[in-house]
Image: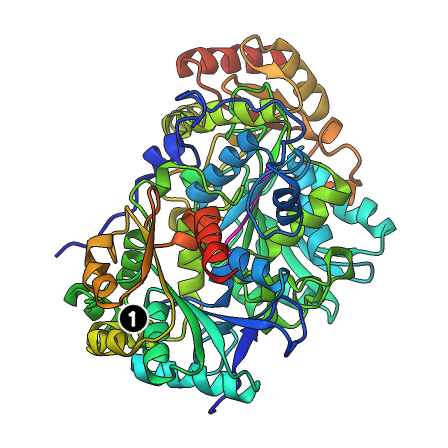
């Protein structure tokens, strides 16, 4: 007898987390544009505050529209739940602030989005949280960098901008052997192309601004917990396993087991840092999530065509896309990313910085801006924009040269994209 | 008792002047499944013991293999804590434990609430076999059949949480063999009617109208066998009433125990 089946990805992308609105029957997710919620009586109010009843109190902590997005992303990732945040950066900060105090240490991949590098390398350092950056190409470097005060290993599923593929099975084993969780930024892959929890990651976050939304109209982030990491067994996280005076002496792990991390992140992190998502933003991102399974294959298909064109162009020096056999992570990508390596990649143009400038300024269909994962195709020169605060040495470590161009392939006719690139490459010569 | 036993107390010290409610979880689960309900009673004048049965949650193993042994284990736990009488609230397998406890120790059972229950609590051979092999299919069956069919297409009352994911994550923490021991204990339990005849205390049934594991019709013989038993049905809930219908479940318990 065949066993019961879980709903498929496409169905969850459209339905998870939402019933037709009980008040109106609205099929679309209603935008609950409210700060707060009327209590039935004083006993109900007290029960909500003391977590004896589930429900909404104040939209900084939770909101019905935002909750639909949170539950939907958790369903697509296979997690226990999620917290939507004001941005992807807020999600990273929420994860770190929930798990560690001053004196803690992170081991992170060196191939990160520039903003994440800034947060870990400079800003959190001011608050006593140190980070050691290591090459994602050598998982053993994560092991070597672990110290007694390390509390987190972190990397991007596809590194920015060199598309380094994080060996999640290997790095998560290193993390777990040391009693530590692995957090991954899965923005470039989305749950459609990769399921990091199935590979061993414990926590995932997305910049929902990118492919999840896909329309470039809303900034947001989502932090998802697998619920599989045993905080009690690790013994390194009193934040989750010891009574917390800041919340009625609650021991979050004892109270809620698999939900401990999200419970503290929501009840402390959103309460105190306040980087919550607005209901309208959640609604807008949900519109994108509903078609994620249709958009991602097209993004990948068009990217393959564009990469194919660039591979045969004599003015292109190097292409960093893991589906190309010359990419250092090609074999790993075949294993971890069988559905494709996403729609963001970089290449080096001959002629360095000046050729790069001419190329970008000649493009007509591609938009020159600081974003990726839009339905529209985008281009940027990392050395002068997203990664401009990084030293030359750090740039080199991250695989960025003076002529490196990053493209994000959208949903236009790929022939038009190729024509735009061909014309602009000629102009840059 | 062999091995360390854990019970959640809602951060309160035991007060002999208060009545006690013991919550007993179902197959493969643990005390935190009762999060909202146990916390409520802990903060509203009751001593709370939300137990982790041996080999579940924070309690050491090995897993017990019969409902009778589990009922005896709960009695020993209460004895160790010098609790003479308690109300037992049991879910699924825990409801059979509560029933058997009330039959074996009538002087210790103040009231029993049986949530998501059925008698007999037969488990399909395919489910048992998958659990015997520690196959992921068993955890999937427990997760899918353990919730109403509409759960993946509706919102969780607990904002931002994915009910399927939560259940799967709990089951992933189980040691091999534990789910099978639990399911087998439910399947093999044959003392329900005999126990029902011995129950002296008030009994409440809380059932989920959309329960696929223990549908309300499968509890009717037991309800009829206990004179004076009350039954409440949550119209939209499946088997996981504490998560799917937390307020309806809590309100039923408040009305019964309060």
Instruction: Indicate left or right for A16 with B257 as reference.
Output: left
Q: Position of residue A404 (x, y in %)?
A: 64, 30
Q: Position of residue A7 (x, y in %)?
A: 30, 41
**Vertical arrangement, residue B52 with respect to residue A99, above or below:** below
Q: Position of residue B180 (x, y in %)?
A: 28, 73
Provide the chain ID for the residue under circle 1: B
Instruction: Indicate left or right for A197 with A243 as reference.
Output: left
Q: Residue at x 33, y 71 (%)?
A: B179
Count of labels in the image = 1
Q: Residue at x 52, y 58 (%)?
A: B37
Q: Is residue A34 visible?
A: yes
Magenta span covers which residues?
A: A222-227
Q: Residue at x 60, y 38 (%)?
A: A56
Secondary structure at numbered mark 1 = loop
Q: Estimate how packed mark 1 is, as few (under 14), some (14 to 19) or many (20 or more) residues with alpha carbons within 10 Å.
A: some
Any magenta on residue B15? no
Residue carrying label 1: B134
């Amino acid at each position: 007898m065949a066993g019961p089946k879980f709903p498929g990805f496409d169905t969850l992308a459209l339905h998870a987390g939402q019933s037709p609105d009980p008040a109106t029957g609205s099929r679309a997710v209603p935008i609950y544009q409210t700060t707060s919620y009327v209590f039935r009586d004083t006993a109900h109010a007290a029960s909500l505050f003391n977590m004896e009843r589930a429900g909404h109190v104040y939209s900084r902590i939770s909101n019905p529209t935002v909750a639909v997005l949170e539950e939907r992303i958790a369903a697509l990732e296979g997690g226990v739940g999620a917290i939507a945040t004001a941005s992807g950066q807020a999600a990273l900060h929420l994860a770190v602030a929930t798990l560690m105090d001053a004196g803690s240490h992170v081991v992170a991949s060196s191939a990160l989005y520039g903003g994440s590098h800034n947060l870990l390398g400079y800003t959190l350092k001011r608050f006593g949280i140190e980070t050691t950056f290591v090459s994602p190409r050598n998982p053993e470097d994560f092991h070597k960098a672990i110290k007694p005060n390390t509390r987190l290993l972190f990397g991007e599923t596809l590194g920015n901008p060199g598309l380094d593929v994080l060996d999640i099975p290997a790095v998560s084993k290193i993390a777990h052997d040391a009693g530590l969780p692995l957090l991954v930024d899965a923005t470039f892959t989305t749950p459609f192309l990769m399921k990091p929890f199935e590979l061993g990651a414990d926590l995932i976050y997305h910049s929902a601004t990118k492919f999840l939304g896909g329309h470039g109209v809303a900034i947001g982030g989502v932090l998802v917990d697998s619920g599989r990491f045993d905080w009690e067994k690790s013994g390194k996280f009193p934040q989750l396993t010891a009574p917390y005076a800041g919340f009625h002496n609650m021991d979050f792990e004892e109270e809620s087991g698999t939900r401990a991390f999200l419970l503290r992140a929501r009840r402390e992190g959103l309460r105190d840092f306040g980087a919550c998502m607005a209901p309208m933003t959640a609604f807008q991102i949900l519109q994108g999530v509903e078609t994620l399974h249709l958009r991602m294959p097209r993004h990948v298909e068009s990217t393959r065509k564009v990469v194919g064109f660039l591979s045969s162009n004599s003015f292109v020096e190097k292409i960093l896309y893991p589906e190309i056999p010359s990419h250092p992570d090609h074999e790993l990508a075949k294993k971890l990313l069988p559905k494709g390596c996403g729609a963001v990649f970089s290449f080096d143009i001959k002629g360095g910085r000046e050729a790069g400038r001419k190329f970008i300024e000649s493009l007509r269909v591609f938009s020159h801006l600081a974003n990726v994962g839009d339905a529209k195709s985008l281009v940027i020169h990392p050395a002068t924009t997203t990664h401009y605060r990084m030293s030359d040495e750090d740039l080199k470590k991250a695989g960025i040269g003076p002529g490196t161009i990053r493209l994000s392939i959208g949903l236009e006719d790929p022939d038009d994209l190729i024509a735009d690139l061909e014309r602009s490459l000629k102009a840059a010569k | 008792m062999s091995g360390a036993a854990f019970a959640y107390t809602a951060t309160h010290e035991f007060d002999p002047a208060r009545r006690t409610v013991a919550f007993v979880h179902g197959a493969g689960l643990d005390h935190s499944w009762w999060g909202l309900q146990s916390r409520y009673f802990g903060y509203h004048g009751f001593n709370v013991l939300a137990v982790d049965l041996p080999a579940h949650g924070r309690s050491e193993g090995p897993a017990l293999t019969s409902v009778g042994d589990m009922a005896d284990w709960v009695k020993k736990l209460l004895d160790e804590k010098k609790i003479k009488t308690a109300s037992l609230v049991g879910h699924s397998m825990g409801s059979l434990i509560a029933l058997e406890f009330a039959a074996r120790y009538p002087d210790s059972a103040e009231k029993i609430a049986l949530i998501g229950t059925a008698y007999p609590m037969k488990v399909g051979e395919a489910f048992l076999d998958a659990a015997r092999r520690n196959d992921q299919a068993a955890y999937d069956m427990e997760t899918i059949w353990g919730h109403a069919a509409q759960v993946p297409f509706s919102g969780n009352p607990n904002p931002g949480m994915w009910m399927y994911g939560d259940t799967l994550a709990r089951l992933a923490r189980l040691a091999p063999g534990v789910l099978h021991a639990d399911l087998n204990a439910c399947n093999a339990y044959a003392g329900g009617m005999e126990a029902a005849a011995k129950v002296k205390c008030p009994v409440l049934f809380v059932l989920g109208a959309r329960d696929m594991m223990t549908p309300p019709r499968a509890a009717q013989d037991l309800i009829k066998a206990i004179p004076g038993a009350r039954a409440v049905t949550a119209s939209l809930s499946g088997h996981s009433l504490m998560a799917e219908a937390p307020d309806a479940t809590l309100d039923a318990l408040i009305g019964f125990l309060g």
